[in-house]
Image (cartoon, helix red, strand yellow):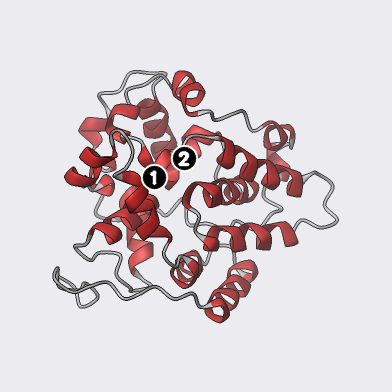
Amino acid sequence: MTADVLPADTPLPKPRRDWGAALRALRRLLRDKEDTRQVFEIMRALTGDAMNENYRRLYTTPRGGRIAYQRVELARKLMDEAWLDTFPEGSVGAAYRHFIRSQQISAEGLAEVSRETGGEIDTPHPVAWMARRTRDVHDVWHVLTGYGRDGLGEACLVAFSYPQTRSLGWALIALGAISRTRGGRYPYAKAIWQGYQRGKAARWLLGEDYEALFAEPLDQARRRLGITPPTVYDAIPPEARDIVASPTPAGAPVPAAA
């Protein structure tokens, strides 16, 4: 147990939003899009009671009680190379496998960045587990939504994530990204807004059984989940998508030990 992990019988602190800290972190992030630590500073400052509410929502869904009871640590599962290799081409699992290997990223790399800000992320508590679950599915959502790791793709996924998680940090980062697109040649703001609309229209992805989801054909999973094509994002040339400041920590590199 690290110094930042609370004992299991210690209640989590009552969440309070700190807009000052969030805005300072946003300014640092917009100055340096590679400073992904600021994303977790923003999320910690503005998440409030969202994870608690999401956990309560989870165990009221048909499969959520079992998922909440089992509390699988998705970062560990997503680092299991042998497990990932079992999924056939065309499946969600195969698409995720290709995504992380081609980009040389990992779920554990993202987890390591999240720990740099301290807090209660590794606490043995159901709500902290829900926060880890939300963090760990970020790159899976890249695959499901069709958004790349370029700056615009990250901004669109942030906007998608807000209605899915109801965490105000995502909303602030999305607005910050939009502020960087003014006067651009392409409809960046429209693409980000479409990300929000897609997230609002889709089924609640935090309630999914990801082990079962990975076995589904990707196109079938997208239809089932109500995830529509990212038409505005796709219409913008790939070489023009990095104009938007990259606002999230997706793409944390594979740890040296991996």
Tell me which corner region of the image, top left, top right, bottom left or bottom right, holds residue 147.
top right
Relative side of 233 to 38, left or right: right
Disc 1: which residue: 137
| Viewer-nearest residue: 56 or 91 | 56
- Amino acid carrying label 1: it is Val
Query: Under tag 2, what secondary structure?
Result: helix
Indicate left or right for 73 with 163 as reference.
left
Category of crowding for the residue at label 1, using alpha-carbon neighbours closer than 10 angstroms: few (below 14), some (14–19), many (at least 20): some
Where 94 falls versus 2 (above or below)?
above
Q: Quadrant of the N terminus?
A: bottom left
| Count of numbered circles on the image | 2
Give the residue at x 18% y 74%.
10
The residue labelled by disc 2 is 141
Label 2 to label 1: alpha-carbon separation: 6 Å
Q: Is residue 61 left or right of residue 82?
A: right
- Camera sees residue 254: no
Asked if 100 appears above or below 254 in the picture, the reply is above
Q: Amino acid at mark 2?
A: Trp
Which residue is at a point 38% across and 52% down the rendered structure image? 54
**Label 2: how many Cα within 10 Å (few below 14, some 14–19, many 20+):** some
The foreground one among 142 and 251 is 142
Quarter of the figure with residue 178: bottom right
Q: Residue at x 48, y 33 (%)?
A: 144
Image location (x, y in percent) of residue 6: 20, 74
Along the viewing direction, whichever of 124 and 241 lies nearer the viewer: 124
The answer to whether one can see residue 140 in this image is yes
Q: Are marks 2 and 1 in contact (CB under 8 Å)?
A: yes
Residue 49 placement (x, y as % from top left): 41, 64
Give above or below for 203 relative to 255: above
Q: Toward which corner of the image does residue 34 lie, by quadrant?
A: bottom right
The residue lying toward the viewer, choosing from 84 and 166, is 166
